[in-house]
Amino acid sequence: MERITIDPITRLEGHGKIEIFLNEEGEVANTYFQIPELRGFERFCVGRPVEEMPLLTNRICGVCPEAHHMAAAKAIDAVYHVTPPRPAKLLRELLYSGFYFTDHTTHFYALGGPDFVMGPDAPVAERNILGVIHKVGLEIGGKVIQARKYGHTIVEIIGGRKVHPCTSIPGGLTKGINEEQRKQIEEMGLWAIEFAQFSLKLFNDIVLGNQAYVDLILGDAYTHRTYYIGTVDDNNRVNFYDGLVSVVAPDGTRIGKYGPGDYTDWIAERVEPWTYLKFPYLKKVGWKGFVDGQDSGVYCATPLSRLNAADGMATPRAQEEYEKFYSTLGGKPVHQRLATHWARLIELLYAAERIVELATDPEITSDNIHTIPTETPTEGVGIVEAPRGTLTHHYWTDERGVVTRANLIVGTTNNHAPISMSINKAARSLIHKGVVVNEGLLNMVEMAFRAYDPCFGCATHSLPGQMPLQVTIRDARGEPIQVLRQHC
Amino acid sequence: MDDTASAPTLVLGLGNPILGDDGVGWRVVEEVARLTGGQAGSVELDYVALGGLSLMERMIGYRRVILVDAILTGRAPLGTVHRFPLEALPPDVCTHSGSTHDTSLQNALRVGRAMGAQLPDTILIVGVEARSVFDFSEELSPEIAAAVPHAARYVIQSLQEA
């Protein structure tokens, strides 16, 4: 059996490794996707005051600390059986919308977008944000930097500091915003709407205007008919901060919605011998292996999943794009994973519109931002939509509020099984006997998982300076017959 | 790009302070603060868990930056202190300067410079050879903890060489 190893995965958090095993005929026999897991966080939390969790958990990951902060904030509300006043909820969601705006911008322009803007066959040295700037124009770089700055500033105004917010406490927030800050956020939000519309136009021109890319998106190589989950509001519209988690089947039927307290009725976790990371699946459907279809409990939690699991977007411009998305791609649900990049931009527009909506809510500058907890703390679950998937924090405490146990299901983990399936399927359709494995081809395998915006480790632990990519092809005896490298 | 820095030189401890040896960059900068008694003159000391574009954005406005980080070369004993300019960062070495969520620090700096951002002329890396960066803990391994004063002196020496 031949073995092709892509190690580590370029542009993915932490070290990742894909192993592709070929059979005697040179066809893909099997693929394994391995990543090292950061260990012991749940144990690390035990013995600490639960109100520290929004600060501690946002140190898990350098990519989405705001998501961990917010899931932890909602979990500690639940632990203390307290509901924050409406202005506090609005402010948290406003902070979160600013974060989403930054995160989705970064993914499109630096991580996922270059595959399309530069093309999957472009040399790896050009397939990055610098290449995008050279191709699209210098002003785009300035806009991306500006977009990130605005998102960070919104987080800082409400969260007390950039990137690692520190203002959520059980029952609300430690500080509100004044009229001057509100106005500043509103102005940034108006700019953000224009930027998101510009980004969608760019996607429309470069990707949808290129038949080869449309064929790539709609092709079978990147298609899986799985279940989808995503948080929705009372009207079944996408919401990042609050609501119920909607679950839809591969045929688009909603099979139910669950609140934070019921997540264990819906989600179970599978352990495989070849990786430490677990594979969550829908308990009510059951684990049938790495397969798609109505009978397999494999589900997906991504921007595409959120759109599939909802009935629409809660803001007008994003709703227009939502309708165009499904009419262009042939109706709901959309199973083509590369469409996730488009879905992410629709969410970018929604985040921008939501910033303006929340910043102009009459209650947003209210000083009624905290409900003092009066009950004995016990146990609680908080769920938010991290940009890369539904994020669940579950804490147990003693009567003093000291953590006795914690369980986290992070965004990317939801997608572990679908990512493995996508890599396998892409490899099977792209690697055949006689086909020479080259960088462009391997990048197309990598594109399979890049659409999920996976984040296993984070910028908060050591990473390779240049993310070397080494591909080793081995013959049936395990001897290397070809070694391809980039950044090495 | 109208950001102006409060000091011409920035010393940044990189890493995750609750991820074992990964937090060594923070500890070294704390030690620098202790040794200099907060009297480092025109030097700003800070601790961040950032990479890529975010790290580049943090460096805007400074003439010189010293990044202190855990480093995994796999070719030196634990606790070995490395010191080299960013340009000399070997491609197969692990540090926080390579954020894979967006882009490498080197690319991020090119983006920033292309945008007209005032970015440092000199970026020096002081790296402590580490290994245990996957287990959550506030404790450093003994070899790494023992290297903290050495690394701090390297930083101070580098500041004086300006």
Image (cartoon, rainbow, N blue to C red):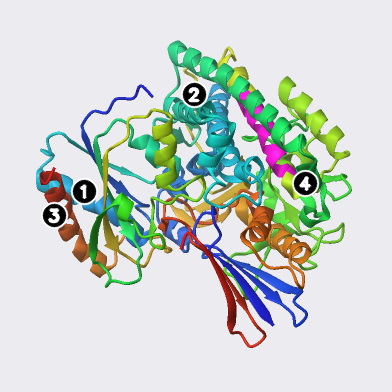
Residue A217, disc: 4
Query: Is A343 inside the magenta-drawn segment?
Result: yes
Q: For the residue marked with disc 1, what is the amino acid? A: Glu
Q: Which mark is residue B30?
A: 1
Foreground label between 4 and 3:
4
Secondary structure beneath disc 1? Answer: helix
Determine whether label 1 and label 2 are within 8 Å by CB: no
Q: How many labels does the image show?
A: 4
**Does label 2 or label 4 sit earlier along the sequence?**
4
Separation of residues labelled 2 and 3 (CA atoms): 46 Å
Q: What residue type is labelled 2?
A: Ile
Q: Is residue A420 left or right of residue A6?
A: right
Q: Compute the Cα span from label 1 to label 4.
A: 50 Å
Please, what is the dominant secondary structure of the magenta stretch?
A: helix
Q: Sequence-wise, which precedes: disc 3 or disc 1?
A: 1
Both marks 2 and 4 on one chain: yes
Where are the magenta residues, as a range?
A339-352
| Location of mark 3 (residue) | B153
Q: Which residue type does callout 4 highlight?
A: Ile
